[in-house]
Amino acid sequence: MDAQAMHIANGIVNGTVSAIFAAFAALALAFCVWRARADLDDRLAPMAGLVAAFIFAVQMLNFQVLPGVSGHLLGGTLAVVLVGPWVGALCVSTVLIIQCLLFADGGLTALGLNITNMAIIGTAAGYLLVAGLLRVLPKTPSGLGTTALIASVVGVVAASQGFVFEYWLGGTTQLSMPWVSGTMAGTHLLIGIGEGLIAATTVATVARVRPDLVYALRRFRTPPAPVAATTAAAPATVSGGQA
Amino acid sequence: MGAGHAHPLHLDRPSPVHALAPEVKILATLLFTIVVVATPRTEFAAFGGYALLLAVVAVLARVPLAWLAKRATIELPFVVLAVTLPFAGHGERITWLGLSLSVDGLYGAWNIVAKGTLGVIASLLLAASTTMRDLILGLDRLRCPRVFTQIATFMLRYLDILADDARRMRIARLSRGYDPRFLWQVKAFAVGVGALFLRAYERGERVYLAMVSRGYDGRLPRPEAGGATTTDWAASAVLPAAAAAIALTAVLA
């Protein structure tokens, strides 16, 4: 547990920009809370907790890609596929808040920046891709795995560019922005591939064994399917009403 | 760790800081960090004052300084970033020991190291003196939306389930004479991750349904007498108030 995972610390980005992004993150999360209420049923509540725990564990894996430049997995796409965009963003932000308070990982005043990058930009980019790709790719476990892989790579790189944007707005030191942007994108491309492979295997396994748990597949289920699935799975799970 | 209520950074000590209500500690840490970050980077004396305040809290909380120093290494990646700034920065440059250093970069490096370290130590003191259960209770009392506390409660429970199941699966694999550790054996790892996820979910789902059938409604039962007393609020307000006083004197002077 002593891995040196690290989010943006205090003092990297100046106070004004931090405050603006904190307000932005609070607004976006309030919207997510409002939308998540409809989603969070008896099946999704424990799943949201597990996804958060999984992301927490995965964020402990830190890649030292270049000397001094490290990054870690984000897990936004995994959350989007399994629990949907609203609850997914909340899962990632819960992880960030707990890491900040209990593990001193990431500055308290930089929490808004970290949430904006990882929970909002990363998750939103992942969700848009998942929603788009699933229209084209087959709705099978391997199709879902491929979707998760691609969406993870793009989501992680988008989140890293969020940091670049914030640093450009309010970095406490003048650095050449193309250099920062290039380093972050390169690092996170590799991280995204690693993350994508983990997300893809997890999602594909879940889709194979318990397709009822995959949020991204809910929309594509034809009406008679849940009835058949519920009767088949009746001994294993509590046969509640289909949400 | 057995009960699943402790976390790696918690230090169980009888101390006045541990006895404070969690919500006042969270708020005090947050306010203190905001004051630190808002301080202009050239006020070197003020940062010394903040460090002194944290040292007093550490002594009161009976947290050894060596423990803090060791845990503070979590910010090392950013310190490494800070070391490169004087070389990579722009603007006016000075020469020191034959090295050409950027003045702006030097200030930037100091800024990151000073504010980062103070923030990490403040968070470490909070973590050392607060259990997970208390932290969630504190967030709940600070009117944090219930969705968050619910996800956080389950997350903290699932962390132990995940770790336990991972250990069991590893022992099962080793006892069958298979120990994948090379890149071409990555499939075993991948299959293991998926299986771990499902096993943990199914255990957690049973636990959740058991909780629901015993009346769980999204919020854990709260101790009746709980809540911060006026003394708690007053005691915890000393830290941010002292920090704000230091900042004001430094800026005005």
Image: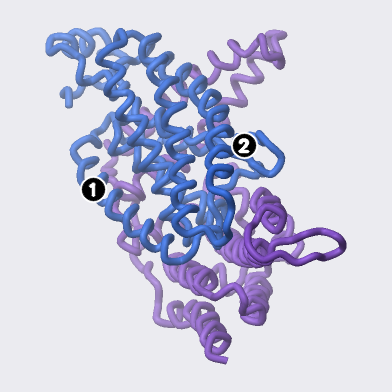
> What's the residue at 27%, 18% (across, down)?
A217
Q: Quadrant of the C terminus of chain A?
A: top left
- Which numbered dot is residue A31? 1
Which residue is identified by label 2? A62
Q: Is residue B158 left or right of residue B141?
A: right
Q: Residues within 10 Å of mark 1 (few under 14, many from 20)?
A: few
Residue A149 occupies quadrant = top left
Write down the colour of chain B.
purple
Q: Which tag, 1 or 2, sits closer to the chain's start?
A: 1
Nearest the eye: B150 or A185: A185
Question: Do callouts 1 and 2 point to residues on the same chain?
Answer: yes
Q: Chain of mark 2?
A: A
Query: Residue B47: image x %, image y %?
Result: 63, 76
Q: Amino acid at mark 2?
A: Asn
On screen, residue A89 versus residue B175, left or right, reads left
Q: Amino acid at mark 1?
A: Phe
Residue nearer the viewer, B230 or A82 = A82
